């Protein structure tokens, strides 16, 4: 048992159940090929306000609770172990959205290809899809939802600045795309965040099929 396992084992019931749910979702999405080559990262907000986030380089198909780290509010760890490089993007979503308790980031093929096809656009619009109702607060297919896209950047401060305008609006879209990179999706609990991600991945598959129906 390493130090992280020890810390997580001592957490309250709500936090431990969020971590268990996150590990199950990470393994499921990993099996689907959504986090190839140790990519992607996941986090949950704990009951005491801290964030548990996956460590850098973990194989998400085999994720264990001990692969989650507890950085401080600036993303720093005391023991020198590195959390995911994208931890600042998780922290930003939690800061901007107090009701959110789970953030999921994957690199699925549909997300990656759609984000490249839509380069230069502000976002991808979805309208008249029954599955839009999988998004929290959406009760009809007859609504237009825009999934924002931001340019990729290896500088997390610049990436966070590009995401800021979307996160500060009241859009019902619980996700944004990063061009040629992946998607961030969130929810009040892990199952809601996973449902959002699954629905948006499905909508992006539809978007791609409509552009290339023979594929
Ligand atoms: Zn990424």
Image: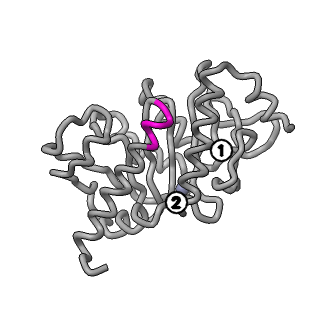
Between 189 and 124, the residue placed more toward the observer is 189
Asked if 48 appears above or below 117 in the picture, the reply is above
Q: Give the quarter of the image for residue 167.
A: top left
Which secondary structure lies at badge 2? Answer: loop
Q: Is residue 44 magenta?
A: no
- Extreme residue toward the left, this view: 142
Viewer-closest of 124 and 212: 212
Q: Which residue is mark 2?
A: 34
Residue 113, quarter of picture: bottom left
190 in magenta: yes
Q: Which mark is residue 54?
A: 1
Part of the protein shown in magenta: 189-194
Name the residue furthest bottom: 214
Q: Find out if the beta carbon at label 1 lies less than 8 Å from the nearest ligand 1 atom.
A: no
User: x and y percent of residue 180 in the render?
Assistant: 44, 65
Q: Secondary structure at mark 1?
A: strand
Q: Say whether residue 161 is left or right of residue 69.
A: left
**Mark 1 surroundings within 10 Å by alpha-carbon count, few (fewer than 14), some (14 through 19), many (20 or more):** many
Residue drawn at point x = 32 percent, y = 34 percent: 136
Structural distance between the alpha carbons of marks 1 and 2: 15 Å
Front position among marks 1 and 2: 2
Residue 160, percent across and down? 47, 44
Work out whether mark 1 precedes mark 2 in sequence or the reverse, and give the earlier one: 2
Query: Looking at the picture, does residue 213 appear above or below residue 2?
Result: below
In-front residue for pair 112/9 = 9
Quadrant in which ligand 1 is drawn: bottom right
């Amino acid at each position: 048992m390493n130090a992280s396992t020890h810390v997580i084992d001592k957490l309250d019931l709500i936090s431990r159940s969020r971590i268990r749910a996150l590990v199950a979702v990470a393994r499921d999405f990993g099996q689907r090929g959504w986090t190839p080559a140790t990519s992607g990262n996941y986090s949950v907000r704990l009951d005491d306000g801290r964030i548990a986030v996956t460590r850098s380089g973990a194989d998400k198909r085999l994720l264990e609770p001990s692969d989650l780290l507890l950085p401080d509010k600036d993303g720093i760890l005391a023991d020198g172990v590195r959390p995911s490089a994208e931890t600042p993007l998780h922290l930003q979503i939690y800061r901007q959205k107090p009701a959110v308790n789970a953030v999921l980031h994957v690199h699925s093929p549909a997300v990656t290809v759609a984000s490249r096809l839509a380069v230069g656009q502000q976002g991808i619009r979805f309208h008249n899809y029954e599955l839009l109702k999988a998004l929290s607060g959406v009760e009809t297919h007859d609504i237009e939802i825009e999934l924002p896209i931001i340019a990729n950047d290896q500088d997390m401060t610049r990436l966070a600045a590009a995401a800021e305008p979307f996160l500060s609006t009241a859009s019902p879209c619980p996700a944004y795309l990063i061009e040629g990179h992946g998607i961030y999706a969130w929810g009040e609990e892990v199952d809601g965040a996973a449902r959002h991600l699954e629905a948006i991945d499905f909508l992006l598959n539809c978007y791609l099929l409509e552009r290339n129906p023979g594929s």
